[in-house]
Image: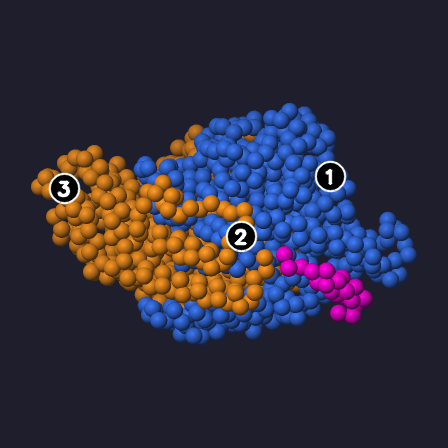
Chain colours: A orange, B blue
Amino acid sequence: MAVLASEIDTLLQRAARIAADYLESSLDRDQPIVAWRAPEELEALLQLELPRVGRPLDEVVADAETFLRHSVRTGHPRFFNQLFNHLDPAAVLGEWLAAVANSSMYTYEAAPVFTLMEEKLGEKLCSLAGFDQGEALLNPGGSVSNLMAMLAARNRSFPRCRVDGFGPAERPAVFASEEAHYSIARAASICGFGLRGARAVPCDEHGAMVPAELERAVERAAEEGLTPFFVCATSGTTMAAAYDPIEAVAEVAGRRGLWLHVDAAYGGNVLFSPAHRGLMAGVERADSVSWNPHKTMAVPLHCSALLMRDRGELHATFATNADYLFHDTDEGNRDRGDLTLQCGRRVDALKLWLAWQAQGDEGYRRRVEHAFESVAAARRMVLERDGLELVREPRGCNLLFRWVPEEWRATPLAERPVQAMDSVNVELRERLKRSGRVMLNYSRIDGRVALRLVLTHPELTAEDLAETFDAVELAGAGSL
Amino acid sequence: MAVLASEIDTLLQRAARIAADYLESSLDRDQPIVAWRAPEELEALLQLELPRVGRPLDEVVADAETFLRHSVRTGHPRFFNQLFNHLDPAAVLGEWLAAVANSSMYTYEAAPVFTLMEEKLGEKLCSLAGFDQGEALLNPGGSVSNLMAMLAARNRSFPRCRVDGFGPAERPAVFASEEAHYSIARAASICGFGLRGARAVPCDEHGAMVPAELERAVERAAEEGLTPFFVCATSGTTMAAAYDPIEAVAEVAGRRGLWLHVDAAYGGNVLFSPAHRGLMAGVERADSVSWNPHKTMAVPLHCSALLMRDRGELHATFATNADYLFHDTDEGNRDRGDLTLQCGRRVDALKLWLAWQAQGDEGYRRRVEHAFESVAAARRMVLERDGLELVREPRGCNLLFRWVPEEWRATPLAERPVQAMDSVNVELRERLKRSGRVMLNYSRIDGRVALRLVLTHPELTAEDLAETFDAVELAGAGSL
């Protein structure tokens, strides 16, 4: 059914009002993060059936409003549940206009402005990483960026694999720390090395890879008959936000002929800050870097950059030269569709470009520094409160801690009962989530449950943190 | 820099106006599709540098308006360049609100409404394909859906591969028609089979796979020592929109123990039409189907569904059970993050769900039937015009044709000079593109250049087609 221009206008104006209200309410600390409901209950409430005959637009918009009411306000200052949170209004503008421009990033002719924009963003991101001759591509998430890096590395080390497949004697191995993101092991499985082709390297007490352990793991793999060819150093691990020592890892990689990939999906933003970029010292020695602006540069999902030190490696890995799409013209040389494992690819450049205009490098520097200040403040609060236990000394922008029930507060940390502590912390975390007051996540670290605060929200205050820890203690005591 | 609520409101209202104007102008046939410029010229004009210090939002919005002015109006009725075109306003609403909701599809707790919505869309899409026990997932494009299907097939046929990698004697082979999408061969390369592990099966004169040739190709591969395990039948090939005979391919797949994947990324919409769904007869026998609503259901990129006949295969292929993310709770059982090769995944469900509410099955049926009517009308016009030559009898919603210079119109089709005809057609297509009047694409088919019209725009009229062919003839004669 054709929709009239005036209807489109009315619809989009209404969308803008709904969205503005939602963004505003996300920053309203008195609002719950989510009005939590169980799946069955929510299902019954929403009635999501798909109709045989179309419904009036008015009704459809009303439904959309309802859905937002039942969604999680991920921009709320007390939403600590994932590695993303706040949204930059300029980025929302970018995502909205990219949606109506509705093009695909494979060719210059289909997306001229956005192609040039992605090139420019790539230059800038590469220069922050110290890649003077590099290129970058925006991908649907860090897992895809990591997979693409591994495929590029595979192509360099096993140049016949792209065309001929694996030779019978080839058993490649990749390496990442035991606290690296699961996408590395899964990428190894996708590439045909198997999950066992991905070796986990032990970490130190902060969660950073131990370079000597990397060297040992590489040796052991070689003794087993595997061919080590790729190592991933993580800048900002998923749980602890730990930073692997890139310089030392690069030394091992250099000696052993490994492709060095840096997974800075979460932690890459320290490159904006003279005070903190030392955490990624040596990054310019990497072959590739993943860096997700959707995590800490406040743009909507997805926006994951893969930075390549050398131009041409992506093309060598992925190009198929499909002649229905890529044409040999002057502008055809700017086509980016053969640099990726996708074909059609969303315009993720516009939101990042517009947000960057609004923030500038300086805005991002301030955000990074604010996040580290939040970590320091949160750490102090945990140490000051009897009911809380610090799990790790933080090095990045996450804080790992636990609640301690009254009866074990006098017990030394090491002797507190693991299983009982685990289950009270898991329970209190569920209670927090359902309360809508705080949303944080947890995982097992060093064999025990740790609660995680992701402290990168640019509007996070000391009051928010105090309120968060109050809620944790109340939930622990069963009073929330 | 924090932005005030009133500023957000103003910004989003302005975005809505810009977007409404743009969508309106896209449907204005007097507007050019693009004000074409060469990359260097556009670069100089746009000044895309990223600033050290943030700029006022007002300036940023003004930039965004400029970018749209220089973008390609992909919703224009005479934009035939890609397999997507029109946008449904309800889908735009969905994309916009998904952007501000900014969640990720990995867990129910982070995206409760959208998780249920994707389940419901999956049920519906599966039921259209005849999968009663299936499940579906929305992915960033058909290439990713195809890759995931191949990985699931690999996991079934080579169950040790996921964990242990390839054994030394394993040389898997996959099959697709010679006119299948390039993502199939590239997926084979990614999986470790090499581009040569993907065998191209010859097609008939309409571009449909010949089942007997498939059988022969499978035999030949087995004789070479390969292990055939996967065949892709295409429903709607990229150039000709041809439909492979699924029933007959399923027979071969059944006899040879191959996973049957149907790549209906482009052509899946015939399932809405009793008149045309026969083109996909036998689809219920497939193991998996790719189907891209962003192509013909008028939702913004991306929205690609992978439909699985059997629940559980995706989980078996991709699950890593990362304990920082997936928790063993009642609602945790609804988590969808372990069904994919991504980690964070955009909310693509909302736009499709809202668009479907506005259209209903009936709306989509009408669109499919309108597209086939457009093909019939375009075919008649090509046959009626001396200056045009039909390249193939169409079976789906694309039309392949050529312009014929005056001097060869009396020459029988088969004797017209290949190289000269190729270059005039490529040239005229470039001229059309730069004129902004018509944008269509081309490729080599049966060794010769064919121009392609993608005829799925729901507002396409006979006048648009006449205007298009007029422009082609003018461009051919050098008068455009």
Secondary structure beneath dot 3 equals loop
Marks 1 and 3, how far apart in space? 71 Å
Read off the residue under disc 3: A405
Residue occupying the point 69% across, 50% down: B372
Numbered circle sitting on residue B203: 1
- Residue B377 coordinates in the image, percent (x, y): 75, 55
Name the kind of residue labelled 1 in the image: Cys
Between discs 3 and 2, the one toward the N terminus: 2
Where residue B264 appears, x then y in whole percent?
A: 61, 43
Question: Is disc 1 in the same subunit as disc 2?
Answer: no
Q: Give the range drawn in magenta.
A: B458-480
Q: What's the residue at 86%, 51% (across, down)?
A: B413
Amino acid under label 3?
Pro
- Is residue A247 visible in the rendered image? The answer is no
Label 2 sits on what residue type? Gly
The residue at which mark 2 appears reads as A54
